[in-house]
Amino acid sequence: MIKGLDGAGIDWDIVVETESDCTIEATVSADLAVHTMLEGTEPPHLERVDHNNSLPKLPAQKVNLYGSGGSKCVVHDSLADMLRCAFRGNEKVKLSAT
């Protein structure tokens, strides 16, 4: 994101530097900053900014899912399959408890 802003000649400032999602969300909620997130992962109290293509396109982001490769676990495998389908945009993903 920073490289894209720099490449487009857009001035920017870091308002808050933290590893806490709550701190970032509070800063954005107070209209003190803007923030990037994976599409569809934004909390309901935040809204997308319509920038009319005035901001540079963001690069693709990779999401890694790590799990134990040794033993087979139905819960682990089902959760991994559900997450893969959700990130592919498969709307048929349903949660159920048995």
Image (tube, helix red, strand yellow):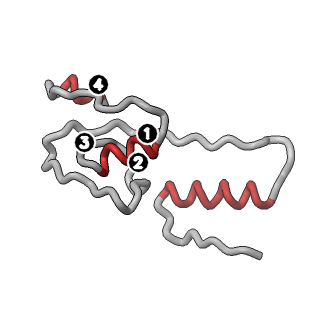
> What kind of residue is marked 2?
Leu
Secondary structure beneath dot 3 equals loop
In x, y percent, where is residue 59? 35, 36
Expressed as whole percent of the image width and height from the top left, the position of residue 26 reads 36, 47
In this view, 74 is above or below 15? below
Do residues under tags 1 and 4 come within 8 Å of each other at their CB atoms?
A: no
Residue highlighted by disc 2 = 38
The answer to whether the residue labelled 1 contacts the one labelled 3, judged by CB atoms less than 8 Å apart, is no
Residue nearest the observer in this picture, 70 or 31: 31
Tell us which disc is closer to us: 3 or 4. 3
Q: Specify few, some or many for label 4: CA neighbours under 10 Å numbering under 14, 14-19, or 20 or more.
A: few
Estimate the x, y position of residue 79 in percent, counting from the top left.
67, 58
Tell me which amino acid carries mark 1.
Answer: Gln
Along the line of sight, which residue is nearer the eye, 43 or 23?
Answer: 23
Q: Are the residues flagged by discs 3 and 4 in contact, CB closer than 8 Å?
A: no
Whichever of labels 2 and 1 marks the residue nearer the N terminus, that label is 2
Q: Which comes before the other along the chain, label 1 or label 4?
A: 4
Indicate the position of residue 88 as horizontal and vertical percent values.
49, 56
Q: Nearer the viewer, residue 61 or 2?
A: 2
Looking at the image, do the residues carrying marks 2 and 1 touch, with CB atoms under 8 Å apart? yes
Residue 76, quarter of the rendered image = bottom right
Residue for point 39% across, 54% down: 42
Earlier sequence position, callout 4 versus callout 2:
4
Mark 3 residue crowding within 10 angstroms, few (<14) / some (14–19) / many (20+): few
Residue at image mark 1? 61
- For this orientation, the residue located farthest to the right is 71
Name the residue tied to disc 4: 3
